[in-house]
Amino acid sequence: MNYELREMLPEDESRVLEIFQQGIDSGIATFETTVPSDEVWDMDYLHDCRWVLENENQEVVGWCALRPVSRRESYKGVAEVSIYFDRDYQNRGLGAVLLKKVILDSEDHGFWTLQTNIFPENQAALKAHLKSGFHMVGTRNKIGKLNGEWKDVIMLERRSKTVL
C-alpha cells in the first residue's frame, strides 16, 4: 500500500478528531475522555509541525502535531508530540514515518527537545518512539486517573543534535 505524507490542512480537522476519538476509545492513548471542539483542538496545538498520513484513497489514516509544554520563553524550544492512527492502520510501522517527519520539521522550526508521555500498555507507541531516537526519562507513577483508575505514564524525550 502506498501512503502520502503531507501537511495537515484545516479541512482535515474532522478526520483528525475522529482518529483522536478512536484513541480515547482505546483506553491506552490519552487521559482525555472527550474530543475537543475544532477550535479548542486548534488552539491547543502549534500551527507548525502538523502532519497527516493518507492512504492510497487519500483518506487520512494518521496524524501528528506538537503542543507547547509551556508558554514561558525559556521553554519555547520544547514541545510535546501527539501521534494517532486509525485503528485499522495501527501496528504497521507507520508511526516511524510520522515521527521522522515531525522530528525533522520541529528542528527546522527551532525545537531542541520533543517529549511525550505514553501509557505502559501502549507498546506499539513506545517502540516507535524508541526507534525514532527518544529515550526513557522515567515512569511517572499514578500521575492521573482515567475512568476512576490511577494510570502510570512513561515519559520519553528526544534532544536534537542539530538545534543547540
Image (cartoon, rainbow, N blue to C red):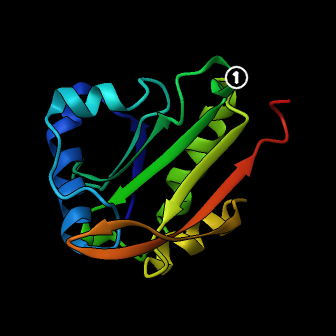
Residue lying at 70% horizontally and 41% vertically, measured from the top left: 113
Q: Quadrant of residue 74?
A: top right
Residue lying at 60% horizontally and 33% vertically, measured from the top left: 105
From the top left corner, tell me how far across and down residue 114 is, in percent: 63, 44
Question: Secondary structure under badge 1?
Answer: helix
Q: Which of 84 and 24 is in front in this view?
A: 24
Task: Locate residue 52 relative to residue 103 in the image: left or right.
Answer: left
Residue identified by numbered label 1: 74
From the top left corner, tell me how far across and down residue 88 is, in percent: 25, 72
Task: Locate residue 78 relative to residue 71 in the image: left or right.
Answer: right
Q: Nearer the viewer, residue 24 or 96?
A: 24
Residue lying at 67% horizontally and 54% vertically, measured from the top left: 157
**Against 160, is 145 above or below?**
below
Q: In which quarter of the image is the C terminus?
A: top right
Q: Assess disc 1: are there few (<14), some (14-19) or many (≥20) residues with their C-alpha within 10 Å of its C-alpha.
A: few
**Against 144, is 152 above or below?**
below
Q: In which quarter of the image is the N terminus?
A: bottom left
From the top left corner, tell me how far across and down residue 48 is, in percent: 48, 25
What residue type is disc 1 on? Ser
Q: Quadrant of residue 156?
A: bottom right
Task: Locate residue 85 relative to residue 96 in the image: left or right.
Answer: left
Q: Which of 145 and 62 is in front in this view?
A: 145
From the top left corner, tell me how far across and down residue 82 is, in percent: 43, 49
